[in-house]
Image (cartoon, rainbow, N blue to C red):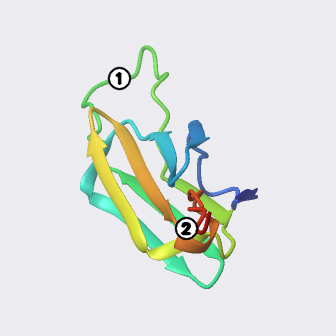
Amino acid sequence: MKSQENSQNYRRSRCDIVQNSDQIIMRLEMPGVGKSGLDINVEGDKLSIIGRRIQESLKGDKLIHEIRSGDYKMEYTIDETIDRNAIDASLEKGVLTLTLGLSEAVKPRKIEVVGK
């Protein structure tokens, strides 16, 4: 899995990516993004994730303005080891978790010995 550069109009989310014997798990910080603001797609060898933030403006004169606005966009190149039909996503407390199942061909398996 390889991360791609994104456009200057988007922010990049911080993420953790781990792999175990049968899946890759990605956790991405997406504060301010709700389920309806997520757009996750796989096309060919590209996994793209867009998170649109819904932010209300405060009325009045700005004294301090530190909360950044902007949407998130990340793109990753995935190879044939990822099963395109075994990708799941969940969003909880501003953290998006993607589970990418590995193809059966790359999963470890025990070889049984036959004969005497």
* Secondary structure state at the residue bearing disc 1: loop
User: Which residue appears at 24% of the width and 31% of the height?
Assistant: 59
* Secondary structure state at the residue bearing disc 2: strand
Q: Which residue position is annotated with label 2?
A: 48
Q: Nearer the viewer, mark 2 or mark 1?
A: 2
Q: Residue furthest bottom?
A: 44
Q: Position of residue 90 (x, y in %)?
A: 29, 50
Count all numbered tags in the image, as a single digit. 2
Q: Position of residue 82 (x, y in %)?
A: 57, 69
User: Which residue appears at 56% of the width and 56% of the height?
Assistant: 110
User: Which residue appears at 60% of the width and 62% of the height?
Assistant: 113
Q: Mark 2 or mark 1: which comes first in sequence?
A: 2
In which quadrant of the rendered image does the N terminus lie?
bottom right
Q: Position of residue 62 (x, y in %)?
A: 40, 22
Say which amino acid is labelled 2. Ser
Using the rendered view, name the quadrant where residue 88 is placed: bottom left
Q: Residue furthest top?
A: 63
Residue 52 visible in the snapshot: yes
Say which amino acid is labelled 1. Asp
Q: Are marks 2 and 1 in contact (CB under 8 Å)?
A: no
Q: Position of residue 106 (x, y in %)?
A: 63, 66
Residue 54 visible in the snapshot: no
Q: Which residue position is annotated with label 1?
A: 61
In which quadrant of the rendered image does the C terminus lie?
bottom right
Q: Residues within 10 Å of mark 1 (few under 14, many from 20)?
A: few
Q: Which is more toward the observer, 41 or 102?
A: 102
Using the rendered view, name the quadrant where residue 112 is placed: bottom right
User: Which label number is shown at residue 105?
Assistant: none
Q: Residues within 10 Å of mark 2 (few under 14, many from 20)?
A: some
Using the rendered view, name the quadrant where residue 31 is placed: top left
Q: Which is more toward the observer, 46 or 34?
A: 46
Kindly report the distance in space between the C-alpha atoms of the residues bearing marks 2 and 1: 38 Å
